[in-house]
Image: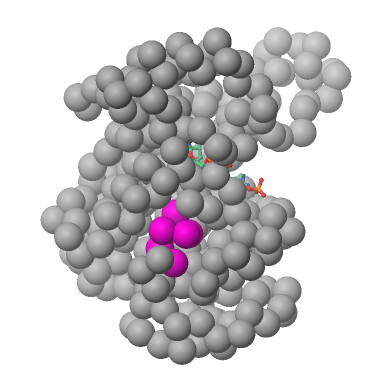
């Protein structure tokens, strides 16, 4: 799988030639945890495909990472997932690692119209739909678009869940949309196991330095979340990135259909 590949992004921008070991597709790779994961894989010589909706954010991220290319797409739409699969097929052929990291709690999405805001049931329907689309559908569509391209044996599929899948986080919608990924991952692990592909879920607790909270995390709330940990600190994107990297390594070949929590012990024992 080692090679020297000419690469252009889907908009035709050449990225020169990259020397890399594996092809790693990272949704939400332009910011936060996904960006840290891209840096982590690049350190071991892997080429990364960074997927997200904002082309400029992806371009900036890719420009700073060896072997990274930007692939703008909205993964809530089948056409977006298909565009990523077409790009990967054209440029690389095989996907060694798929990291389904795109997601959020809706705070960064456009607010609903006034009419919807004024109607509690319509607002609830909006909130649950947004969370399901952002967290569940993005991951399922990208996985279904790419699963035939996964390296076999040795491929890896990873999902980003959350501590909220175990304990909720307010409205129930975000945690539920993450928890929905767990049974999907178990079924997928069963489906892909015979091909020598592992499927796992990583569920972080509070992680600093991401766009996730849209600047709305108060100092008081952050202190309370940190106080729940056993090591007295918030997580970093690097904490999650290194876990994803290890689960993608040959060392983790016998680990599949598991949910691994990265939260300093804030939630324990599942
Ligand atoms: N930060 C935390 O404390 C925390 C804790 C537990 C779990 N998580 C999970 O970790 C993952 C990464 O989040 P983060 O904390 O790094 O926050 P982030 O910086 O907001 O990253 C989310 C990424 O997902 C992308 N994305 C969102 N919707 C998308 C769509 N429809 N199509 C393609 N890409 C999309 C965003 O890019 P665009 O907006 O440009 O599309 C963004 O790059 C998420 O799944 C999140 O739920 C985070």
Across and down, in percent, residue 39 comes to 47, 59
- Magenta span: chief secondary structure: helix
**The magenta stretch spans which residues?**
37-42
Across and down, in percent, residue 94 comes to 41, 76
For residue 80: magenta?
Answer: no
Residue at 18% of width from left, 51% of height from top?
255
Among all residues in the image, which is located at the extreme left?
254
Q: Is residue 194 left or right of residue 157?
A: left
Q: Which image quarter: residue 252?
A: bottom left
Quick check: 138 above or below 207?
A: below
Quick check: 195 above or below 165?
A: below
Instruction: Tell me if residue 191 can be seen.
Output: no
Residue at 53% of width from left, 23% of height from top?
173
Q: Quadrant of ligand 1?
A: top right
Q: Which image quarter: residue 219?
A: top right
Of residues 178 and 123, the one nearer the viewer is 178
Residue at 38% of width from left, 13% of height from top?
227
Give the quarter of the figure containing the C terminus: top left
Across and down, in percent, residue 209 comes to 55, 37
């Amino acid at each position: 799988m080692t090679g020297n590949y000419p690469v252009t992004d889907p908009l035709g921008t050449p990225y020169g030639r990259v020397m890399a070991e594996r092809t790693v597709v990272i949704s939400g790779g332009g910011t936060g945890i996904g960006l840290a994961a891209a840096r982590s894989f690049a350190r071991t010589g892997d080429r990364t495909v960074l997927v997200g909706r904002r082309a400029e954010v992806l371009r900036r991220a890719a420009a700073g990472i060896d072997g990274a290319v930007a692939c703008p797409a909205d993964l809530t739409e089948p056409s977006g997932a298909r565009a990523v699969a077409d790009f990967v097929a054209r440029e690389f052929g095989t996907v060694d690692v798929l990291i389904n990291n795109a997601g959020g709690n809706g705070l960064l999405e456009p607010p609903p119209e006034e009419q919807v805001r004024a109607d509690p049931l319509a607002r609830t329907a909006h909130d649950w739909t947004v969370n399901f689309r952002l967290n569940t559908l993005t991951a399922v569509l990208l996985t279904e678009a790419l699963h035939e391209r996964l390296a076999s044996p040795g491929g890896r599929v990873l999902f980003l869940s959350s501590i909220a899948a175990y304990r909720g986080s307010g409205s129930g919608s975000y945690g539920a949309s993450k928890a929905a990924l767990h049974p999907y991952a178990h079924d997928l692990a069963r489906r892909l196991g015979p091909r020598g592909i592992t499927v796992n879920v990583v569920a972080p607790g509070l992680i600093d330095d991401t766009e996730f909270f849209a600047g709305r995390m108060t100092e008081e709330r952050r202190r309370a979340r940190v106080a729940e940990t056993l090591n007295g600190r918030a997580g970093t994107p690097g904490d999650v990135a290194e876990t994803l990297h290890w689960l993608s390594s040959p060392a983790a070949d016998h680990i599949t259909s598991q949910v691994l929590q990265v939260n300093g012990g804030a939630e324990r024992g599942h």
